[in-house]
């Protein structure tokens, strides 16, 4: 139990930490340790000096994980007090699972409004322990929707730098989601108006959003075998640019029916070369991408998102989904990834649409485990208390609640999402969701 004085000291220090820029945080913890007559290490633990080490060490040392270790203490510590009776703990680390919002400026460049949006959610004391950005195309061909941001040229690096600076000023941590849509695109979005690229020449039965509204996706062209290394190189280059833009790391988007799943799944991949047919062959593209990215920036700065059984974007479930993804996990385990981020069930839909043993997949990867899809506060608490997850990612609740971390800790009510304003547009439905205590 804390005495009233200790409680006051910690309360004041936490307030200071919330406002302090990175460089000034250590002295606050040291002062607190002196006031509490404990070691600096213990002061860290008691304070849960959220975001204290945010990114700086990781940028220098590619083998250190991007995950917010300190946030773990903060979040767990604060909640234990109020949830002791049930013996529950807060999600070890909350992650903001960002969502494409189609609000980039011309040239697929992140803008000031986006920087504001991310900064609002960045303070680890009130927002996310780790932000995963909206999906970001690694090349012009990787785009599939209007106005999504890119990360393949210097203007985009400069645009993202605004975002990462704003997030780091709040003490937050941010990784960018590296994305190639494959066949989920439209000729009007492709350079030269040509067919989108995929593992296959069969079109998906789904729509995308282009200038003028929704449209059926276009018929793709199957990548030639000799073109595949070039696409792998685009992932590597985007990862390098991510570090240049100030990101703490990247998350490779291997989910939701986009290019990587178009290679993985036997319901889509109809190739006869070394990238099609057997599980080993279909996994090859993803493995090469992960090797390239971790080779460039380190496993500790690289996460991976998967969605083993989602039907999103006309991705039929693989005939051997469990074997396929466990093979991927075993192959990628040596890369010592920062985290694996798994969408359980159908993205944004039923969590039990198809059987899948996620615990077995976790064993195959042996990496920090982030779960997502329809998590409520109670589900998140249970997932962590049962050891089922290391992190819980929240998508839609974080759009409508910039201070979701605080609301979850305090079990405060959540703002309602305004779904009609999710995509496109300006500040409305994006940066205007109120913080707790603010006048509505
Ligand atoms: C508006 C919107 C945009 C999304 N954009 C992305 C994205 O860019 N990358 C991604 O991996 N998932 C994306 N998703 C899926 C979410 O990340 C998440 O998996 C889904 O919303 C379920 O989690 P939740 O119940 O916490 O919202 C998007 C979902 C929505 C509703």
Image (spheres, helix red, strand yellow):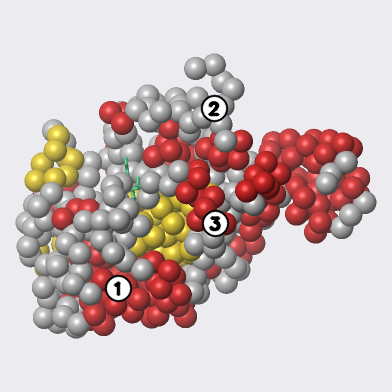
Q: Which residue lies furthest to the top in this view?
A: 439
| Mark carried by residue 435 | 2
User: In this rendering, does residue 323 appear at all?
Assistant: yes
Q: How far apart are marks 3 and 1 (CA)?
A: 23 Å
Percent position of residue 43, x then y: 81, 52
Instruction: Look at 74% across and 40% down and name the residue there.
Output: 14
As helix, strand or loop, the secondary structure at mark 3 comes to helix
- Earlier in the chain: of badge 3 and badge 1, it is 1
Tell me: 168 left or right of 256. Answer: right
Q: Would you name the residue on which mark 1 appears?
A: 322
Q: In front: 326, or 31?
A: 326
Tell me: 63 left or right of 241. Answer: right
Percent position of residue 77, x then y: 70, 49
Instruction: Look at 75% across and 54% down and name the residue there.
Output: 45
Compared to residue 59, the image places residue 121 above or below, namely: above
Neighbourhood count class around disc 1 (C-alpha, 10 Å): few under 14, some 14–19, many 20 upward: some
Q: Would you name the residue on which mark 3 appears?
A: 384
Q: Residue 274 occupies which quadrant of the picture?
A: bottom left
Instruction: Look at 50% across and 56% down and name the residue there.
Output: 383
């Amino acid at each position: 139990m804390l005495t009233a004085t200790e409680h006051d000291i910690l309360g004041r220090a936490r307030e200071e930490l919330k406002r302090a820029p990175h460089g000034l945080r250590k002295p606050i913890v040291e002062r607190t340790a002196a006031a509490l007559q404990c070691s600096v290490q213990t002061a860290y633990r008691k304070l849960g000096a959220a975001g204290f080490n945010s990114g700086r060490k990781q940028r220098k040392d590619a083998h250190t994980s991007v995950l917010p270790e300190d946030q773990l203490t903060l979040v767990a510590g604060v909640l234990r007090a109020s949830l002791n009776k049930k013996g529950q703990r807060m999600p070890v680390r909350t992650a903001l699972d960002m969502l494409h919002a189609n609000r980039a400026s011309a040239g697929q460049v992140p803008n000031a409004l986006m920087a504001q949006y991310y900064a609002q959610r960045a303070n680890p004391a009130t927002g996310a322990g780790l932000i995963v950005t909206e999906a970001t195309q690694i090349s012009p061909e990787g785009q599939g929707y209007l106005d999504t941001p890119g990360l393949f040229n210097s203007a985009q690096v400069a645009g993202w730098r605004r975002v990462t600076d704003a997030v780091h000023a709040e003490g937050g941590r941010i990784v960018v989601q590296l994305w190639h849509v494959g066949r989920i695109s439209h000729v009007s979005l492709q350079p030269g108006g040509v067919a989108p690229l995929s593992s296959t020449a069969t079109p998906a039965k789904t729509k995308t959003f282009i200038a003028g509204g929704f449209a059926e996706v276009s018929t793709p062209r199957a990548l030639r075998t000799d073109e595949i290394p070039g696409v792998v190189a685009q992932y590597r280059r985007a990862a390098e640019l991510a570090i240049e833009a100030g990101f703490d790391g990247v998350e490779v988007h291997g989910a939701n029916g986009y290019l990587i799943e178009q290679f993985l799944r036997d319901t889509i991949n109809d190739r006869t070369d070394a990238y099609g047919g057997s599980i080993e062959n279909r996994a090859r593209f993803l493995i090469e991408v992960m090797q390239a990215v971790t080779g460039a920036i380190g496993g500790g700065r690289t996460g991976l998102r998967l969605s083993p059984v989602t039907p999103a974007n006309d991705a039929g479930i693989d005939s051997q989904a469990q074997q396929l993804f466990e093979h991927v996990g075993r192959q990628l385990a040596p890369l010592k990834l920062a985290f694996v981020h798994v969408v359980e069930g159908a993205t944004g839909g039923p969590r039990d649409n198809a059987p899948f043993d996620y615990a077995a997949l976790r064993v195959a990867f042996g990496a920090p485990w982030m779960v997502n899809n329809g998590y409520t506060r109670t589900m998140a608490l249970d997932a962590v208390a049962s050891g089922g997850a290391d992190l819980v990612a929240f998508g839609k609740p974080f759009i409508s609640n910039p201070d979701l971390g605080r609301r979850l800790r305090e079990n405060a009510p959540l703002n309602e999402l305004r779904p009609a304003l999710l995509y496109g547009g300006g500040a409305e439905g994006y940066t205007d969701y109120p913080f707790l205590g603010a006048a509505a």
